[in-house]
Image (tube, helix red, strand yellow):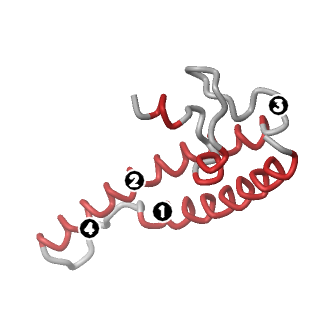
Amino acid sequence: MTPEERAALKAKIADTIEVTKNEIVRLKELSKPVSPDNAIGRITRMDAIQSKSMSEASLRKAEDKLVKLEAALEKINDAHFGTCIRCGNAIQTGRLLFMPESTLCIVCAGK
């Protein structure tokens, strides 16, 4: 990976971290408990509970992604950054730009 690619990737990771943090704030708001004293119908309450459950799943996924992005940002200057943890080959730069938290190359991720 060239220094220019590494700098672009570092900027991309920093931007993605900010977007993910904002998404987490939004999802936390959507994951608040459904109040039973709210005067809504039974079907509407069930929809609200289902929507809350989906938001909680998305929240867990976003929090996991944030942890991986922060780890990638810490390791970006490491000599082994961008190397597949399974096969040891270089992870394609395009894959890292699309998914900076990737630790597997496209071939190993497809297995």
The residue mark sitting in front, 4 or 1, is: 1
Label 3 or label 1, whichever lies nearer to me, is 3
Q: Earlier in the sequence, mark 4 or mark 1?
A: 1
Real-space Cα separation, disc 3 to disc 1, in angstroms: 33 Å
Distance between mark 3 and mark 4 Cα atoms: 45 Å
Mark 3 / mark 2, whichever is N-terminal: 2
Q: Which of marks 3 and 4 is nearer the N terminus?
A: 4
Task: Tell me the CA gap for discs 3 and 2.
Answer: 34 Å
Name the residue at 63% across, 41% down. 92
User: What amino acid type is highlighted by mark number 1?
Assistant: Leu
Identify the residue shown where x is 57% and y is 63%. Answer: 25
Q: Are the residues at dot 1 and dot 2 in contact (C-beta closer than 8 Å)?
A: yes
Three-letter amino acid code at disc 2? Answer: Glu
Task: Say whether residue 61 is left or right of residue 4.
Answer: left
Task: Give the residue number, with chain letter if any, for mark 3.
Answer: 78
Q: In this view, does 65 lie to the left or right of 76?
A: left
Q: Is mark 4 on a helix, strand or loop?
A: helix
According to the image, label 1 marks what residue? 27
Which of the numbered marks, if any, corresponds to residue 56?
A: 2
Sort mark 4 into few (<14), some (14-19) or many (20+) by Cα contacts within 10 Å: some
Which corner quadrant holds the N terminus? top right
- Compare residues 6 and 55 and report the one nearer the observer: 6
The amino acid sitting under disc 3 is Asp
Vertical arrangement, residue 79 with respect to residue 97, above or below? above
Give how far across and how far down residue 84 sits, in percent: 61, 28
Task: Give the residue number, with chain letter if any, for mark 4.
Answer: 48
